[in-house]
Amino acid sequence: MKRSESLSEQVAALADGSQTASFLAERSLERAKKNAGLNAFAALDERTVLAQAEAATQRRSSGKTLSPIDGVPIAVKDNYLTKDYPTTACSNAAPLEPSGTDATLVANLRAAGAVIFAKTNMHEWAYGATNDTSTIGVTRNPHNLDHITGGSSGGSGAAVAAGIVAAALGSDTGGSVRIPSSACGIYGFKPSYGRASRNGVLPLSWSLDAPGPMTAALEDIGHLLPFFLGADPKDNSTFNAAPFGQISFEGKPKLLSLTGKGLERSDEVDAAIRSALSTLDAAITEAQLANVTGYFAAWEAILHCEATAYHNALLAKNPEGFTSVTRAHLEAGRRLTGVEFLEAQKLRTHLLKVMLNELPDWDALVLPTLPVPAPPHGQDKQKFGGRSVTTQDSMTWFCWIGNLAGLPCLTIPVGKSSKGLPIGMMLMGKPGCDEKLLAIARNIDQSINGGEA
Amino acid sequence: MKRSESLSEQVAALADGSQTASFLAERSLERAKKNAGLNAFAALDERTVLAQAEAATQRRSSGKTLSPIDGVPIAVKDNYLTKDYPTTACSNAAPLEPSGTDATLVANLRAAGAVIFAKTNMHEWAYGATNDTSTIGVTRNPHNLDHITGGSSGGSGAAVAAGIVAAALGSDTGGSVRIPSSACGIYGFKPSYGRASRNGVLPLSWSLDAPGPMTAALEDIGHLLPFFLGADPKDNSTFNAAPFGQISFEGKPKLLSLTGKGLERSDEVDAAIRSALSTLDAAITEAQLANVTGYFAAWEAILHCEATAYHNALLAKNPEGFTSVTRAHLEAGRRLTGVEFLEAQKLRTHLLKVMLNELPDWDALVLPTLPVPAPPHGQDKQKFGGRSVTTQDSMTWFCWIGNLAGLPCLTIPVGKSSKGLPIGMMLMGKPGCDEKLLAIARNIDQSINGGEA
């Protein structure tokens, strides 16, 4: 697969008049048709898309452009409320008609002139990381249709990787932005908990969830950031931090590569990460993170308790609306005790304390995004690093750490496996320091992928 | 019983030289001996007291007085860490030797020159409201030794009511400051959650706990407030609010008297409250609070989950250290589910929303503090308002509401029962508005008890 056009390139082409919003929309629609086999979309209406694009084209030709991204097509995961598309979370449990309201982030992008292109396929209710459980069926990886995209934002990953759109929105509770981004060879960013509004994004686990962009290039994230980060009165967990923008990072970043029991990875992924790191002008050290298994159990306890607390009334009312897999997860959530939930919260605080106070000082933590490249459809187990784990657990293997600790996390592509499947590297920053993480990543991405610095 | 000397009177006598700190200490020691039958103290060392008092007397005579309360004896519940007394929470599970550190509030009072007089008897670990479960035995009510003090700060209530000290510290998770204050005929104040530091106060349920003063007169609370309220870097739930001090309240306060299913009270208590209210220059209305039973269950779920989460490791290590009653409570806490805990948190938010947005506008909510006067020792059930409830539940009957919603709450004495036992009235303010509540209460107390306005 050749590299897709980036959102930044689209922004430039719109600005210099070499492309119009209508052209971009038509081309995206055409590519969506060509790539129907990916099963990336839960809702896509040609007239809705063309009408938005036409309005954007008109605005630009009359000098009333709303923002640099005015006219850029952006796809949205099917758990974001949208006023022109239904929202189902790819479940039959409680499908919502077009609601007349947009999630805050969708509203922000729409106000900036973005063309809300489609709703993307996802793992039912975001409660899984393989995207093989969805009312509309599995998504397929553009790099190899026999392989999964990972999830739960699998449709967004496939749509961007196939070049249908240059950017899509995902949500991330244990990696759901980063997993399909890594598996599909694109960039995925999970902001710090509280930096981006969750208003209008159907929750999986409210204290772990973060919405995030998935893009063809790293600089695309910078174009979206002004519409992404910031306090929202409709989400009382959000806060304002340092102003966003082109914050630069001078000097060698201190990268801390995490290892330890529970952080194993396949030899192929390990080699790709080591090779990528070897090209960098950075101070790279390794550190063991202890008790990964304990922290993972804490993440799972919080996830299961909150997910079941959120869905409990619906589960009682319409159990058959959920797939049996999701229903089983939700029912299992009822068995966890309150003490287990609170002990998990203690471990969450402890993990952050270890990261900030006990590990050697760092600017970014480094891990592979996934321990293995995207597995084939239907494969239940993954073997790596002397372990055999479920495909589900292999997808969240490293990513949940960023959710439990509330860190900003980014995945960037660093190469391909022997079978041509993408491999991603994850960088994690300190809580609230999203801009610094992206600034560090810009330098790293340039070294590895030759992106613009 | 005649009214005890107040802390305010002691402050005045110290200031005009008519009494010395040493005199107050000696008199308190003498009264403690005379009232040994109350079983109010868990630790009291004559030399420790006299040494502190002597230092205070010296300071004042050499013009180096630390604050208006320099030299005033104050007793402290046995769950506050103190550097000169052991801390046991009246349990054998994990008694602590004098720790070399004071709880923040004890440190504040000590720095102001207060004489830390004694540690007071309490319900084991504060996990009960009768004070009949304690390693050192039950406390007895100064108004009638055959009756309970209520708890869990029963020793503090008895010590103040008997005039041994004019002020004592308690802690309040479901009424533990207000219950013994009401039952013993004194004033008890539970600050808003987050206004007073919990640092160094052994927790019962960290999201419900509040430390609070128990005093002979209402104005005594004002003398203690500067050492009580304010953000503490050692307790990250604390915040700074309006400056404390003599905030006055002009005009008629809007008092909202709460009624409804679950808020029944005995005829005698109801009559005493109505009689007290009838003397006030206030706009008094009644409103029904719906779903009291549901909110109560939410308070209980949070209490049990947090208490067991806090004690779980100790319970596994030293189960025999707890009395069988407390152990049974803690073991029951293990059976609540995480979903029940989270649903309780939703109800907590809902209660506050109802109070602030759905009830008629109010300056203070009014309830009896207890539905019955202090019961006799050994009585398992209380009958009132057509109900028969456990003595434990009758003690927390109204008080838990203030903890679940995080409100500032005050109990003031309003009369006596036919058997000569005190009856208290509870006022509750809006979260953070502690000073306004106390200003309103000053006017009310003057009408009812003739206190200074």
Image (cartoon, coloured by chain):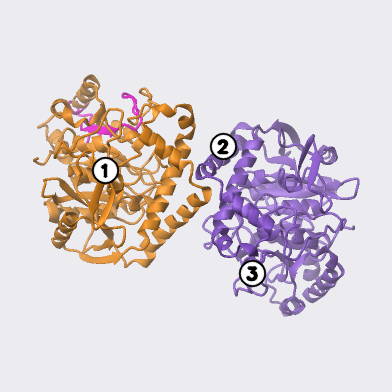
Chain colours: A orange, B purple
What's the CA distance linking mark 1 and mark 3?
A: 52 Å
* Circle 2/circle 1 CB separation < 8 Å: no
Question: Do dots 1 and 3 share one subunit?
Answer: no
Instruction: Answer with the quarter of the image where residue B79 lies.
Output: bottom right
Q: Which residue is mark 3?
A: B95
Q: Nearer the viewer, mark 1 or mark 3?
A: 1
Q: Assign a secondary structure to mark 1.
A: loop
Left or right of B367 in this view: A247: left
Q: Assign a secondary structure to mark 3.
A: loop
Amino acid on which the number 1 mark rests in the picture: Asp
Amino acid on which the number 2 mark rests in the picture: His
Dot 3: few (<14), some (14–19), or many (≥20) neighbours within 10 Å? few
Left or right of A126 in this view: B58: right
Amino acid on which the number 3 mark rests in the picture: Pro
* Circle 3/circle 2 CB separation < 8 Å: no
Q: Which residue is mark 1?
A: A380
Q: Nearer the viewer, residue A288 or A197?
A: A288
Q: Which residue is mark 2?
A: B350
Span highlighted in magenta in the image: A59-88
Please give the name of the residue rendered at 62% of the width and 57% of the height, measured from the top-left corner: B229
* Residue B59: assigned label: none
